[in-house]
Amino acid sequence: MIAIGNMFASYEYIDREVSIDYFYNLNSNTTYEEIENEIGKPNGAMGSGITIPYYQVENQYVVIWFARDEDGKYTNISRMGLYTNTMYIGDIPLKE
């Protein structure tokens, strides 16, 4: 367990190099499946109860809220936020 924005989060180390620019190039039509195919699965999920997947980028975390289909599976991005272990930095705007 780690903290993201002072909230508990699960954590799994994944050996990958991804730039923060990758996330700034995503739009609301980008799906969970596309991201997973391009850079792999998330490092974990933030929160308890309702959890939100995130990706570690160096010493920061990109938390991604996804819409869900009728079966509860993640579909496209609805919002992204950038965090450190102790604070929320700000939203990452979705490209048009």
Image (cartoon, rainbow, N blue to C red):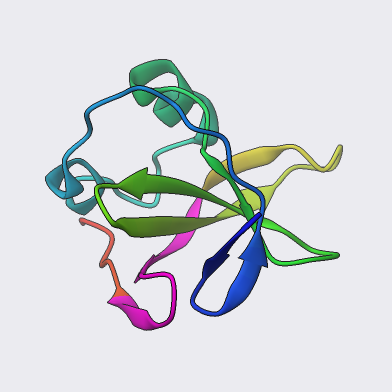
Q: Main secondary structure of the magenta part?
A: strand
Image x and y of residue 63, in percent: 46, 59
Q: Is residue 57 left or right of residue 9?
A: left
Residue 19, quarter of picture: top left
Image x and y of residue 64, in percent: 48, 55
Q: Quadrant of the C terminus?
A: bottom left
Residue at the image point whose x is 37% and y is 70% from the top: 83
Q: Quadrant of the N terminus?
A: bottom right
Magenta run includes residue 82: yes
Q: Is residue 92 left or right of residue 86?
A: left
55 w.r.t. 67: above or below: above
Looking at this rendering, what residue extends furthest in the front direction?
1
Q: Is residue 45 left or right of residue 65?
A: right
16 w.r.t. 23: above or below: above
Which of 1 and 63 lies nearest the eye of the viewer?
Answer: 1
Image x and y of residue 78, in percent: 49, 60
Residue at the image point whose x is 79% and y is 66% from the top: 48
Residue 89, quarter of picture: bottom left
Magenta stretch bounds: 77-90
Looking at this rendering, what residue extends furthest in the top direction?
37
Residue at the image point whose x is 36% and y is 22% from the top: 15
Residue at the image point whose x is 48% and y is 32% from the top: 13
Image x and y of residue 79, in percent: 45, 64
Which of 57 and 70 lies nearest the eye of the viewer?
Answer: 57
Total marks shown come to 0
Magenta run includes residue 37: no
